[in-house]
Amino acid sequence: MGLAGTDLSREAATWCGRRARSDERSAFVGLFTNKWLWGSILLAITLQAAVIYIPFLQQAFSTVPLTLGDWLRCIGVASSVLLAA
């Protein structure tokens, strides 16, 4: 679970970043107002996917592709920070 754990950490940080915008308002209010945050999220996902799916990067980082089930588990667990208040 090496890289899946790394991906889970990145996903959790992404959701924490969305949640940390306000202590008083929902994380879903004004969801797309911070373009820099969305840019950083897109960059992180792109780089993570590159390490997971591009063969020479797989070899350099000793990774294997994640299945759809792996991705769904990572996203599900990481997004749980939205429910914890």
Image (tube, rainbow, N blue to C red):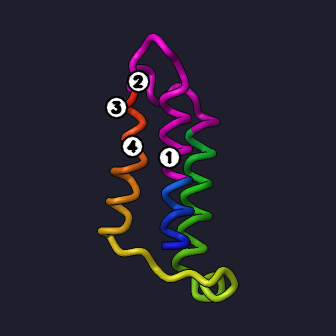
Q: Which residues are magenta?
A: 10-37
Pointer 1: what residue? 12
Residue 15 position in % (x across, y down): 48, 40
User: Do the residues under discs 1 and 3 have CB atoms within 8 angstroms?
Assistant: no
Secondary structure under badge 2? loop
Pointer 2: what residue? 85
Using a 10 Å C-alpha cutoff, classify the residue at mark 1 as few (fewer than 14 neighbours), some (14 to 19) or many (20 or more): many
Distance from disc 3 to disc 4, alpha carbons, whole Å, reads 8 Å
Q: Is residue 73 left or right of residue 15?
A: left
Does 12 appear above or below 62? above
Quadrant for residue 66, please give it: bottom left
Quadrant for residue 60, please give it: bottom right
Pointer 4: what residue? 79
Residue 38 position in % (x across, y down): 56, 40
User: Do the residues under discs 2 and 4 have CB atoms within 8 angstroms?
Assistant: no
Distance from disc 1 to disc 2, alpha carbons, whole Å, reads 14 Å
Residue 36 position in % (x across, y down): 64, 36
